[in-house]
Structure formats: C-alpha cells, structure tokens
Amino acid sequence: MDGNDHHLFLRAAMTKDISLLLQDPSLSAALKAIAQKVMDNKRISFDEGVFLFEHGTLAFVGTLANFIRERKNGDRTFFNRNFHIEPTNLCVYDCKFCSYSRLIKQRSDADAWAFTMEDMLNIVYKYDGQPVTEVHIVGGVLPQYDLPFYQEFFKKIKQHRPDLHVKALTPVEYHYIFKKAKVSYEEGMKLIKEAGCDSLPGGGAEIFHPEIREQIAADKCDGDQWLRIHEIWHELGMRSNATMLYGHIERWEHRVDHMERLRQLQDKTGGFQTFIPLKFRNQENQMSHIAESTAIEDLRNYAISRIYLDNFDHIKTYWPMIGRTTAQLSLAFGVDDMDGTIDDTTKIYAMAGSEEQHPALTTQQLVDMIRRVGRRPIERDTLYNVVQDFTDVEFAEDKEFRGYFELPVL
Ligand code: SF4
C-alpha cells in the first residue's frame, strides 16, 4: 500500500464513506467484493472470512468493521454494572489453556478455593443497596456443585434480590450436572430457568472444531453439545452470549468455522445477544510455550468478527482479559460493548497473566474511557435495555485514574 492508498483508507474512515475503498488501485478484486458486500449489507461467505484473515490489513478490516458498528449501534458503547461469583477453581477437567483451575488433588493449594452456599450468598449480600444489575456466575466443575445445589443457589438469590439478573453457568457445567442428575438437556434447562437463571454467559465455547477442541479441552462438552444447550435455552425464550478463545493452535479456518456455526444457530433462534472474542493468555498453563497474539491481531480479530457475524447485534470486548487500552482501541474496530464494572470479583484472567490483576472500574472510570475515544457511554442491563445514557452526565475529575488513553475522534 503506498501513501495515496493510506490516504484513501483515512478518508474512508473519517468521512465514513467506505465506497472510497473501491477506488484504491492496490486493493484486490476479492477485497473490493467484500467491501461491496458490506456496503450492500450482504453476508460474506466462509471463504471470504478466511480470505479476510489471510489478506485483510488492519486498516481495511477496521474501516469495514467500524462502518458496520456504526450502522448497527451508532456511537453508542454499552457497559453494565455487575459483579462475578466464581464458586470454585477446582475442576474435574484439565483444559490445556486454563490457568485458573486446580485439579481436585490440589485442593489444599494456597490458591485453590471452593465456596459454600453461604460464602456465595454473602457475596450477593455485599452488593445490597448498590446499583448493580447483574451477577455473573461461572467457575470450575465439581461433583458437589450439582443441579440441586445450583437450583437452590439461584432461588436464594432471587428470593433476596428479585431484580438482580442471574447470568449463570456455561454448557460445560450444564452438560456435567445434567448428566449427573440423569436429566435431558431439555428438562435440565427448564429446571434452571424455573430456579431463576435469567441468561447464559458465553463461556466454554473455546474453539468448536474437533481438530482443535480435542487437543485443548478434550473431555468437556463438545462443540455440538455447547450449541445444542444454547439452542434449547433460546427455544425457552431466553437469551445468551457466545465467546471464542483465539490465538493459540487454531488456524484461520477454525476461527471462521466457529463463527459460522454461531451464525447458523443465530439464524435459527435469534437468541444470541453478543459475541465476545477471548484472547488466549499464556501464563501458568500447559500451553505457556505458545506466544500470545499481538494487539494488531486482536484488533483484526474483533473487526473480522464484526464483519462475519452480521446477525449479532453486539461485539463485546472483555477488558479484564485484553487490558484497558486495547479495549478502548477496539471501539474503533467493530466493538460496541465494554462489559462491566466487575469490582475485582473475577480471577480467571488475572491468573492467566492479564495486565489487569485486580479488575475493577467505577462507573465514572468506564464512562470516561468510552468518552475519551469519542463514543457515547450507555449503561445497559443484561438484555441491552438502556438503564442510563451517560453521554452528558458530568462527574468531578478523577485525578487518580490513569488507566486509559485518548484517541483523536474520527
Ligand atoms: S477451562 Fe473451565 S472446564 Fe476447563 S479446566 Fe478450566 S475451569 Fe475447568
């Protein structure tokens, strides 16, 4: 790409006129065809998805992704006020990428924990009177955390605080606890709904393709089972999210295959709300010899996700995993959701080597981060109902907070 072509990309980005890209003489016919499809609001194919990973520069995919992001959500950038409960980091499984879990035989290690029901309810009570709207519950898989245990836990949360949205457990846990309870997925998901679970987070998806899944997460539910549990949940009229763990041993086609399966299920049910790419972090796990992806690759991945998943309303960055500054940057590469305040209640990515060792942001800090890159901060609830538009809300200056940077507003 020469100087003139850069100029075209910049002009396309600044004027939001992506048809300018079609004038770039150095852009291949295949990339121009993809740009044309994006302009025409048409779906790109599997092969075009792989082609974008192989040949799409950050400038090209970013320009298209930002165009789609603004067509769908304008400048709005969503966040919520939430906290996490991680019942245990002991686990019967041994996923190769996992830095968080400890095997049952390591239960006496200093960094292993297994909360009682009372411990977990005390975490919920700690937020009494605070304006959080969601509790996110996910952790390791252990026999004692079975179906009756979680039914009771969800019921107790709802009895105490009916308005708190319970976003709980992934198909990895559900597959295990339903099998142990000898109930079908259909029966099990109905029981979970009746107990008070409001939605499913997106975890446990990793990479669906068996060629990769069998190497990194052999024993837990497979890709089809993960998708089937979400499908049943959607058929019950409920919503969920989806993730993809990228940047380890998978190839481009595995990422596109993963997104293709999600896109097909979304066509069928419409039950997914947001897609959350999760970066593989390499500290203290069995894949530590694999280098982590670069920030440029992370941004390209967000952008191509935004282009490929045309039937997903939102793409979310999980800032405790990627760091605050890359999370801010991602808002120009297709992302429109920054997840939540979190309040230092998750250890999953801190233990994997993320720069966020105590992930917590105040509402003011999240709002400030979003504004500094020229976007409108909107507090949402879990189902994307607007709780408060913070675009013009004024705060006193937070002199202590230095966890962000400023981008020129495009
Ligand atoms: S990723 Fe989940 S299922 Fe796998 S070992 Fe870690 S906690 Fe267990």
Image (cartoon, grey):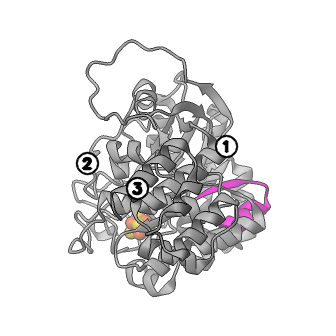
Q: Say what amino acid the circle numbered 3 marks.
A: Thr
Instruction: Residue 367: give x, y in percent of width and height.
Output: 46, 28
The reply to whether the magenta stretch includes residue 232 is yes
> What kind of element bears circle 1?
loop
**Residue assigned mark 2:** 355
Q: Which residues are magenta?
A: 229-241
Instruction: Residue 73: give x, y in percent of width and height.
Output: 63, 43
Q: CA distance from mark 3 to mark 1?
A: 27 Å
Is there any visible trace of residue 346 in the rendered image?
no
**Residue assigned mark 1:** 383
The quadrant where ligand 1 appears is bottom left
**Residue assigned mark 3:** 88
Is there any visible trace of residue 241 in the rendered image?
yes
Residue beneath the point at 58% across and 64% down: 35
Residue beneath the point at 26% across and 69% down: 285
Instruction: Residue 277: give x, y in percent of width and height.
Output: 47, 60
Q: Say what amino acid the circle numbered 2 marks.
A: Glu
Pointer 2 local density, CA inside 10 Å: few below 14, some 14–19, many at least 20: some
Q: Say what amino acid the circle numbered 1 marks.
A: Leu
